[in-house]
Image: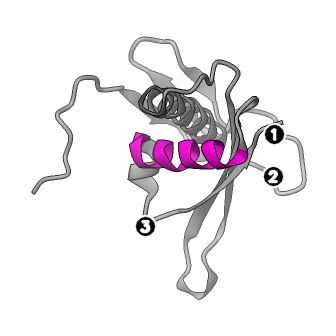
Amino acid sequence: MSTKPTVFYTAHATATGDGRNGHVATDDGLVDHDLATPKPFGKPSKTNPEQLFAAGYSACFNSAIGQAAKSLKVDVEESAVTAHVGIGPIGLRGGFGLAVTLDVHLPGLDEETARALAAKAHEICPYSNATRGNIEVDLNVSTS
């Protein structure tokens, strides 16, 4: 059985220049950023790929929360998801990897329902499905 989706939308982005210190833009011009390599102990001077990934993952996961809420018949109008995307070397293998923590805020729900909702969203979200088995993703769920 194929896990490749039936695609209904494709985003197009092109990176130019010196990679992480270059430029990225979408074909429609809605994303158009100079990039800078993140500094471990400094404030970013320009957008970096990890910020773009965090923005996409948090938005996608919050949409998945909404979809999961419909099946559980709960109100999540005030939901918020903050994605923390870290980058660093991968032990002795060489190369670099990502680590993700999602802070899922579901005010007004009891803790058990909130955790079940976040777990269901984690099954639905395309970013979660893409990262599963490749990037460790921690879910922190709060209700107040």
Chain-order first, disc 2 or disc 1: 2
Residue 54 place in picture, x, y as percent: 62, 40
* Cα distance in 3D space between marks 3 and 2: 27 Å
* Cα distance in 3D space between marks 2 and 1: 7 Å
Q: Are marks 3 and 1 in contact (CB under 8 Å)?
A: no
Three-letter amino acid code at the position of disc 2: Lys
Question: Start and end of the magenta stretch?
Answer: 111-126
Residue 115 belongs to magenta span:
yes
Q: Are marks 2 and 1 in contact (CB under 8 Å)?
A: yes
Binning the other alpha carbons within 10 Å of mark 1 as few (below 14), some (14 to 19) or many (20 upward) gives some
Q: Is residue 15 above or below residue 112?
A: above
Binning the other alpha carbons within 10 Å of mark 3 as few (below 14), some (14 to 19) or many (20 upward) gives few
Q: From the viewer's perspective, tell me whether residue 106 is left or right of residue 41.
A: left
Q: Are marks 3 and 2 in contact (CB under 8 Å)?
A: no
- Main SS class of the magenta portion in the image: helix
* Residue depicted at 70% across the width and 21% down the height: 78
Binning the other alpha carbons within 10 Å of mark 2 as few (below 14), some (14 to 19) or many (20 upward) gives few
Residue 83 place in picture, x, y as percent: 67, 43
Residue 5 place in picture, x, y as percent: 21, 40
* Residue in the foreground of this view, choosing between 62 and 45: 62
When asked about the image quadrant of residue 100, the answer is bottom right
Q: Which mark is residue 39?
A: 2
